Image (cartoon, rainbow, N blue to C red):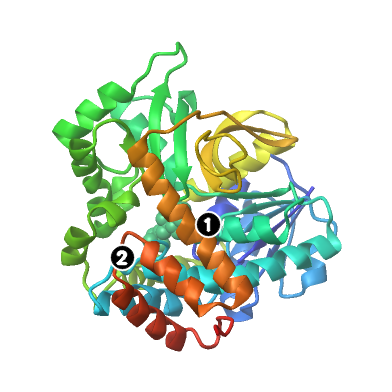
Amino acid sequence: MKITIAGGGSTWTPGLLNAITNHKDNFPIDELVLFDNNPERQKIIGEFGKVLFREKYPNLKFSYTTDIKEAFHNVDYVFCQIRTGGYEMRKKDEKIPLSMGLIGQETCGPGGFAYGFRSIPDMIKLVNDIRKYSKDAWILNYTNPAAIVAVALKKEFPNDNRILNICDQPINLLKSYGKILDMDYREFEPYYFGLNHYGWFTKLLDKKGNDLLPKLKEVIKSEGFLPADAEQRDQSWLDTYGMVQQMVEDFDEYLPNTYLQYYLYPKYKLSKLDPNYTRADEVIDGREKNVFNECKKVYEQQTLDGIKMVHNDAHGDMIVEIAMSIEYNLNNYFIVIVENNGIINNLSDDAMVEVTATLGKNGPRPFTVGDISTFYKGMIESQYAYEKLITEAYYEKSYNKALMALTLNRTVIDVNDAKKVLNALIEANKEYWVELD
Ligand code: G6P
Ligand code: MN
């Protein structure tokens, strides 16, 4: 079995390599390749990988490359996570809207819009490159903004059933619920619906079929909410999880995805976000620095001995568990992004919804959700219209549709704001975006 990681130079890659190592007995692979278009960044992680595998997984054939054929020839799984423009552009995605009094966030609002417009062409190219050399490889894609990428890939490759778009936030939330309830999150049968970074848990069943959601809501209302790995998290993530308490106090039917904070409380979040030091800065000064320093150190001393691993493997574990569920037809529960096609009964068929599915050899088998009630339907309809209009704006090179999209986003609303931020983002993204007429 051959696996390729597209985005070999990502800060998440060392954690993924470690997760692959930890699963070597229950998910054995023969060959692993890192692929990136940034050779300098990838080299540091690739050299770390060589030491890691030499010491912990010596029979694994490992290499890193910038060559498409080497990367994608005869591959079984591609784990993709690319970031067009890198963290420098993430900074702009966050700071440009914030400088105008609008939410500036990696995947939500105008920042997510900008990132989406950069990701679409690169993801289309990547899928074409993979398909040129491996027709049947599973493409497990967690490139952001996953909601927009999923809509665009469905439009470009409507019949390709081996592209699976996924996000780790629902699992992160399940792990956090597990911590509160003192249970392993794998025991849960979650009920969930929405769009990516825009959804709700409606039930959380235990093995006996009892719904744990009412109890969880009570605990969160009275004690607040923390991520399962709180000690490894920066303050901004603790604040984000903290907002779940407020969200459940205001609308206590379901448990919300943390990203809903930006859409439900844009004014409050705006007052808390620092336009001069955003999450991108925090990542550059924190995770990126730590991960790359660690990799360099391992490379220099040519052994893992005495190195305290700073990276987080949880993200990697999720990817490996997804691949295992497909490869061994385990049909475990995952929350994945799939075409609606009636899953949510009163929502258009072409929406790319995030819902619970079992995952096996033939892909995801989602569970039906049925009708959703007016508030959620209203929220999702407008957000989906925004996602769809972005994709149309991209294909039609339409300024007007881009403006419509931003106007529909709950973090923007005012057309004058939408225009102002769109014009500034066009200027900042000249190197990356299609030109809009
Ligand atoms: C969660 C989301 C990802 C997102 C990440 C950002 O895991 O599901 O989509 O990329 O957070 O994390 P960061 O630490 O880079 O802000
Ligand atoms: Mn995500």
Q: Distance between the residues labelled 1 and 2?
A: 22 Å
Query: Disc 1 residue type?
Result: Ala
Which of 39/325 is in front? 325
Residue 103 versus residue 357 in the image, above or below? below
Residue ranking furthest to the top: 208
Q: Can residue 254 be seen in this view?
A: yes
Residue 285 versus residue 265 in the image, above or below? below
Give the mark toward the camera: 1 or 2.
Answer: 2
Which quadrant of the figure has residue 119? bottom right
**Is label 1's Cβ within 8 Å of ligand 2?**
yes
Q: How crowded is mark 1: few (under 14 residues within 10 Å), some or many (20 or more)?
A: many
Q: Of helix, strand and loop, which one carries label 2?
A: loop
Q: Of helix, strand and loop, which one carries label 1?
A: helix
Query: Disc 2 residue type?
Result: Ile
Residue 127, numbered label: none
Q: Position of residue 65 (x, y in %)?
A: 72, 72
Q: How crowded is mark 2: few (under 14 residues within 10 Å), some or many (20 or more)?
A: some
First-in-chain label (1 vs 2)? 1
| 258 with respect to 35 (left or right) | left
| 6 with respect to 13 (left or right) | right
Residue 413, numbered label: 2
Q: Mark 1 points at which residue?
A: 146
Q: Where is residue 328 in the image (x, y as percent from the top left)?
A: 73, 32
Q: Can residue 24 be seen in this view?
A: no
Q: Where is residue 429 in the image (x, y as percent from the top left)?
A: 48, 83
Which residue is located at x 43 percent, y 27 percent?
184
Q: Position of residue 334 (x, y in %)?
A: 55, 36
The C terminus sits in image quarter: bottom right
Which residue is located at x 65 percent, y 77 percent?
37
